[in-house]
Amino acid sequence: MWTYFEPVHAVTYFHPRARAAYEAVGLRGYWRGYFAGRAAPLGAADAPPVVAAFFSFAPPMVSRALPAVWRLATPPEALRARLTGAVQALAELTYELPEGHLAEAADLLERAASTAQTAGRVLGAANAALPVGEYPLARLWQAATTLRELRGDGHIAALVAAGLEPVEALAWRVAVDMSAQSLLGRGWSEEQWQAARERLTRRGWLADDGTPTDAGHADFQAIEDATDRAAGHPWQALGPGDTDRLRELLEPMARSCHTVIPPDSPIGLPALPA
């Protein structure tokens, strides 16, 4: 299900209308909009809790953005810009779908999000507590955002439980299936990247030539399995019939949203089945 609702959320990072909405409230530059928009559900947070919640960004990069962005736009202003840009982007991408299609998808996705367990999931809980949108696209995007942040919180918990540091998780993904260029913008130095690769080699996840080992694949798959188990409750609560129906409704939206998501985006979002 993540592969179907994540594209709906991800337009906020890649669509020009989302960028323009942030700029309209004074958040010029991609990273100002990113950090302000994604952190705004937490309130006017300083860097430390955001370093913890975002996980994969180097602390100095987060510290350069926060709390400075709150002098440009307050959290409520950032939240309004975030939702406005996302809704405008989705309106452009889903204009061919009937209103009833969007409303039904929003109803089901909200039902799934409303059943999610938020204990220990800070970003997910903060998004779940935001007011419900008035129109289908706003409701749809907010529910998708709540579910993806809940899933992300669970993934971070699994990474931490496995003893994996943020830059090590990135170095592993680069070794396996993602471009280094897509992840270099997260603020880690070349020395930190190299040290992470060396630690993964000592751990037995990477061979001496930097290629992933079978042991590394098996250990990381256990992290992915733990992530999926932690994210499964909303779909169990929704039930197989409504979950299948929601997948059908989300598919054309997800395919349209994929047209603005770069293939090598740092989200690592796989293509939908043909």
Image (cartoon, rainbow, N blue to C red):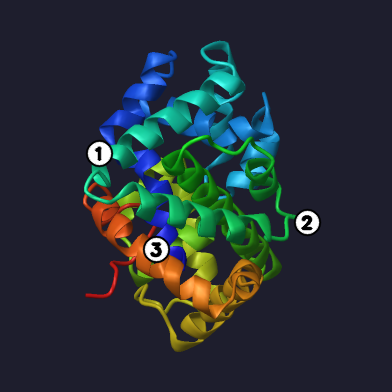
Picture quadrant where residue 227 is located: bottom right
The numbered dot on residue 92 is: 1
Would residue 136 be visible to someone looking at this image? Answer: yes
Q: Where is residue 210? Give x, y as percent.
A: 37, 72
Q: Tell me which residue sits at (54%, 19%) in the image.
A: 77
Of labels 3 and 1, the one closer to you: 1
- Residue hosting label 3: 4
Element at label 1: helix
- Which residue ends up furthest to the right in the rendered image? 119
Near mark 1 (Cα within 10 A), the count class, few <14, some 14-19 or many ≥20, is some
The first of marks 1 and 2 along the sequence is: 1
Q: Nearer the viewer, residue 66 or 146?
A: 146
Q: Where is residue 235? Give x, y as percent.
A: 58, 71
- Which residue ends up furthest to the front in the rendered image? 100
The numbered dot on residue 119 is: 2
Query: Residue 1 vs residue 219: left or right?
Result: left
Of labels 2 and 3, the one closer to you: 3
Q: In the rendered view of the protein, which quadrant contains the C terminus?
A: bottom left
Q: Where is residue 148? Give x, y as percent.
A: 53, 55
